[in-house]
Amino acid sequence: MSHRGQKAICLVMTLMMFASSSCSVKYGPQSGEEFRRETLRLEERTRYHEDPQVRAESRLELAHLYLNHRNPLLNYGKALQEFEAYLSARGADRHTEEIQNWVFALREMERREKETATLKERLARLTQENEGKRKSLALQVRKNQESQAALEKLQAQVEALERTSRSLKEANEKMKETVEKLKNLDLEMEEKRKAIK
């Protein structure tokens, strides 16, 4: 396992350890609908409650709710926002160290998610480029095969022409021999005609 993978596992284990710590949501919703209702209730309290202390504590509860493993609306980004809002509203207190650990861990997760998304985009782009090159190569192979077939056909035609040329040369040689024989025969006949007169 790579060093990066080990760090990721440690980060997840740290998050799980924090999730099971004393800083859990006071109300424990069980179903998706209960999580949705509790999220809406806490979001409303963070915006509209008169007491800034209650608004801050609601942000903390909301952050933990977003981190709850049973929550179908699990959202690390929103949890990070709520923790940061809690810290800016409350300042330093007994929870600051733990919340800062959460903020650090969630920022690291967010950074890694962005890095992963970037790598996935690069992988998709490289895969697409590779597919394009594969198609181009397949096209080149097909053109090469077509060219090879055309070349073989031309070679067969050249061989046929060479055979025809050889045959014509042989026929030409035979004709020359025949013409030479006919000339000789004609000369002989001319001499015999002269001799007869």
Image (cartoon, grey):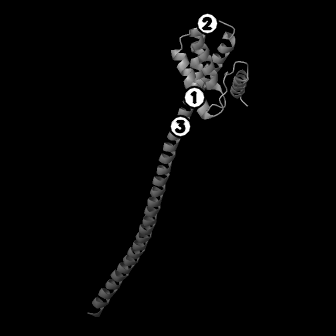
- Within the image, what quadrant is residue 81 found in? top right
Please state the horizontal and vertical placement of residue 85, each as a whole percent of the image. Answer: 56, 14
Q: Give the CA separation, mark 1 to mark 3.
A: 39 Å
Which residue is the site of mark 3?
124
Amino acid beneath label 2 = Gly
Q: Secondary structure under badge 3?
A: helix
- The residue at the point 38 percent across, 74 percent down is 172
Circles 1 and 2: CB atoms closer than 8 Å: no
Q: Residue 82 location, x and y as percent?
A: 58, 18
The residue sitting at 56% across, 9% down in the picture is: 52
- Residue 115 visible here: no
Q: Above or below — where is 112 with respect to 144? A: above
What label does residue 91 carry, if any?
A: 2
The residue mark sitting in front, 3 or 2, is 2
Question: According to the image, label 1 marks what residue?
Answer: 37
Compare residues 12 and 190 and report the one nearer the observer: 12
Q: Is residue 61 visible?
A: yes
Question: If the image is split into quadrants, where does the N terminus sit?
Answer: top right
Q: Nearer the viewer, residue 181 or 43?
A: 43
Which residue: 28% across, 89% down? 194
